[in-house]
Image (cartoon, rainbow, N blue to C red):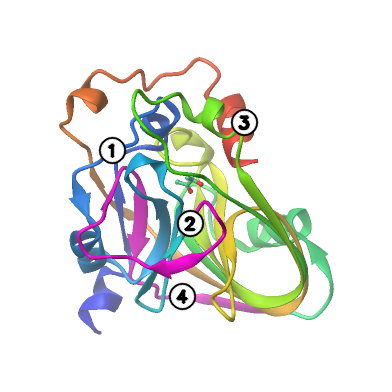
């Protein structure tokens, strides 16, 4: 078993999603460190400067203007979750399905709704609707305010890869409970945080995780943040769609 496969059970996460909701948009962990803990995952960048997607060891910066570049090692993140992707379940999708259908299908085959799962879906999509958040400047607003203005793209008849995680409902706020998925097109020209899609055909791969490592910032902003928003689920629904 490779080191990656051994670590494949572990999810390494920087900060919490509730901190992001509260406008904690600057972290101390550079992607040079994040990369040591995984070759697969999602996240964002300091100042909420776009979406991050990592797959097959390649880390991509999906920017607010819709363009994509490689992540610079020195760039830091206020929120990211990665693992060494090591799927234990694989399924072919032979017929059209909406995001809701696919999520219901995956939920029906997960061994337990109480564990964490990494999800990769590679395929052809009739449509793919994504957003990329844009770089913010301090003093930062809450994320619910930030997403009032966001770059939303809809791709038609495209090929690409969905990367993300399933998180149990009992940790809502630590991460995004349910499915948190990002997309990158096969030609690496487009992508972002997924709002909706319709798949034509593809392959679903699922990795199971029972080990998590959270790295919490010791910044003044995080230590003083309100991480217990009363309407957490509603706020996450608004920001993550
Ligand atoms: C951390 C995320 O995925 C948001 C920025 O889309």
- Sequence-wise, the earlier of marks 2 and 1 is 1
Asked if marks 1 and 4 touch (Cβ < 8 Å), the reply is no
Q: Select label 2 or label 1 by which is in front.
A: 2
Give the number of the mark in front: 2 or 4: 2
Measured in 3D between alpha carbons, the distance from the residue under mark 3 to the one under mark 2, in whole angstroms, is 17 Å
Q: CA distance from mark 2 to mark 4?
A: 28 Å
Q: Nearer the viewer, residue 89 or 23?
A: 23
Sequence order check: which comes first, mark 3 or mark 1? Answer: 1
Residue range in magenta is 63-92
Q: Nearer the viewer, mark 1 or mark 4?
A: 1
Question: Which sits earlier in the primary sequence, circle 1 or circle 4?
Answer: 1
Mark 1 secondary-structure assignment: loop
User: Which secondary structure, mark 4?
Assistant: loop
Cα gap from disc 2 to disc 1, whole angstroms: 17 Å
Residue at 69% of width from left, 79% of height from top? 202
Q: Residue 140's image quarter?
A: top left
Q: Quadrant of residue 123?
A: bottom right
Mark 2 C-beta to ligand 1 under 8 Å: no
Q: Position of residue 200 (x, y in %)?
A: 80, 75
**Residue 13 against residue 123 in the figure, above or below:** above
Precedes in sequence: disc 3 or disc 2: 2
Q: In which quadrant of the rendered view does residue 40 lie?
A: bottom left
Residue 142 percent coordinates (x, y): 46, 24
Residue in the image at 46% along x and 75% along y? 87
Q: On the rendered structure, is 29 left or right of 100?
A: left
Q: Residues within 10 Å of mark 1 (few under 14, many from 20)?
A: many
Q: Which residue is mark 1?
A: 26
Q: Earlier in the sequence, mark 2 or mark 4?
A: 2
Disc 4 designates what residue? 87
226 versus 104 height, above or below = above
Q: Read off the residue under disc 2.
A: 63
Q: Which residue corresponds to mark 3?
A: 148
């Amino acid at each position: 078993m490779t080191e990656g496969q051994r670590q494949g059970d572990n999810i390494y996460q920087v900060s919490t999603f509730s901190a992001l909701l509260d406008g904690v948009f600057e972290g101390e962990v550079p992607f040079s460190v994040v990369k040591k803990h995984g070759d697969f995952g999602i996240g964002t960048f300091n100042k909420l400067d776009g979406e991050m997607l990592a797959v097959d060891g390649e880390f991509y910066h999906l920017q607010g203007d819709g363009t994509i570049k490689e992540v610079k090692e020195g760039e830091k993140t206020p929120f990211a979750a990665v693992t060494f992707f090591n799927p234990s379940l694989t399924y072919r999708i032979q017929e059209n399905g909406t995001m809701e259908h696919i999520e219901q299908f995956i939920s029906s085959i997960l061994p337990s709704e109480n564990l964490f799962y990494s999800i990769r879906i590679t395929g052809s999509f009739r449509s793919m609707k994504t957003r990329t958040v844009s770089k913010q400047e301090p003093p930062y607003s809450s994320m619910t305010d930030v997403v009032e203005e966001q770059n939303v793209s809809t791709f038609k008849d495209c090929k690409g890869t969905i990367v993300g995680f399933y998180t149990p409902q009992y940790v809502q706020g630590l991460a995004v409970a349910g499915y948190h998925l990002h997309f990158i097109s096969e030609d690496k020209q487009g992508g972002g945080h997924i709002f909706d899609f319709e798949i034509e055909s593809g392959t679903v791969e699922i990795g199971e995780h029972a080990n998590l490592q959270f790295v919490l910032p010791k910044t003044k902003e995080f230590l003083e943040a309100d991480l217990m928003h009363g309407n957490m689920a509603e706020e996450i629904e608004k920001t993550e769609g």
